Image (cartoon, rainbow, N blue to C red):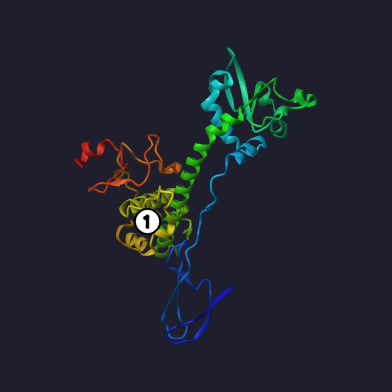
Amino acid sequence: MGTTITCEKCKKIHRYSSGEIENIGTAWHPIWTVKCLNCGDQIIWEQSALEFFDKTPDPKDNNVYKRAKSSDIREYWIQKYIKDNYAKLGFSKIEGPFKVGPDFKGIYKGKKVVVEAERDYQSYISHKHHEDKRFKEVSILIVLNPSKPPKGIKNKLPKTIIFINVDDFVEWWRPRVRDYAKTKRIQKLIELIVGEFQKRFVRDCGDKDRDMSACPECDLCPYFGEGTAYEASSMFQERVLKFISLYRYPITSDDFELTDIDPSEIDKFYFNFFTSAEQIIDDSKYCPYCKPNLEEGRYFLPGGSSLPFYIDDRGVIHNPDCTKIKEVHGT
C-alpha cells in the first residue's frame, strides 16, 4: 500500500510507500513528511488529532445492579470487597487473596476456614474446583450473584455459601472503579508519551545497525546502557515524568487531552534533556523519601501523592507533598 502525494513546489505527483513516509509528530497528532522524488523538497502535511479514550459516561446505577446480578463484575473486585468488608460477612479475620489455590483463609464464627470467592456458584463448578485437590478443604463459597444453586448440584459446592449484599457492594464499588479507571487512563497516557520518546530514540540511535541490536525493542538491546533487560523502560519513564513536570501538564485532570501536547515540545525536550543509551539511569535524581515505583507502573504512591511531580532547582524529582523538600533543599 502507498499514498499518492502532490508536491506543492514542483506540482509533480508521486506515489510513496509507507517506508518512505515518516511521522515527525505524535501518535495522537500525526505530522507526515516525505522527500519529493522530483525536486527533493520536503513535503509536510498534518492529520487531524486522534481520540484515544472512550468518552462514554459512567454507567447508571441500574446498569451496575444489573451487572452485579448477572455476574458481569470482575472477580478482582469481589476479592477486594471481601478484603475490605470481611466483618460484614461474618469473619473475624481473613488472609488473602492468594495467587494460587483457594482465595482466602480466615476465621468464621470462631473456626478456621478456607474460602473461595466467585461471581456466582456456577463459576465454582465451571472452574472445576470441585475436582481439584487443592480445594478439598474449602468450606465457604462467597458469591455476588444472588442466584441460589439447585439441590442437585449442592454436593459439588462448599457446605456454606455466603451471598454478598448487592446494594452494599455497589455502594462500595462505584467510587473505587472510578479511581481505578482514572489511574489506568493516566498510565495509558504516560505509556503513549513514553512511546514517542522511544520512537525518537530509536530513530537517532547509533547502535541500531549493529549485529545484536533488537530495534525497536530497546529493553532487550544489549547495547542499551549496561545491557540489562528492561533498563530502557525505566529510563524512558523517568524522562517522561520530567517532561510532564517541566511543562506542568495537568495529566491527572479529567479534562487533559493528549492533543494538549504539541509535538514540537516533545522534540525540544528530547533534544535538550534526553540521555544517550550509554548513560546509566541515575536513581539519585529521585528523592529517596518519595521515589515513584516505576517498575510496577504505579504513578500514585501509597500516601496518595500523584502527578505532576515537583522538580527542585537541583533537578531532583519529588512528589508535591514530600516532607523533605523544605528540610533538605530549603525550598
User: Up-down: is 15 above or below 128?
Assistant: below
Q: Position of residue 309 (x, y in %)?
A: 33, 46
Q: Quadrant of the C terminus?
A: top left
Classed neighbour count for the residue bearing mark 1: other residues with Cα under 10 Å, few (<14), some (14–19), many (≥20)? some
Q: In the rendered image, which quarter is residue 325 located in?
A: top left
Residue drawn at (45%, 41%) of the image: 296
Residue 226 can be seen, yes or no: no
User: Up-down: is 65 above or below 133?
Assistant: below
Q: Position of residue 7 (x, y in %)?
A: 46, 83
Residue drawn at (45%, 74%) of the image: 45
Q: Position of residue 282 (x, y in %)?
A: 32, 47
Amino acid, disc 1: Ala
The residue at the far top in this view is 110
Residue drawn at (61%, 18%) of the image: 113
Badge 1 is on which residue?
Answer: 277
Q: In the rendered image, which quarter is residue 170 located in?
A: top right
Question: Is 159 positioned to the left or the right of 92 in the image?
Answer: right
Give the structural element (helix, strand or loop) at label 1: loop
The residue at the far left in this view is 330
Residue drawn at (42%, 53%) of the image: 256
Q: In the rendered image, which quarter is residue 125 located in?
A: top right
Residue 304 can be seen, yes or no: yes
Q: Quadrant of the N terminus?
A: bottom right
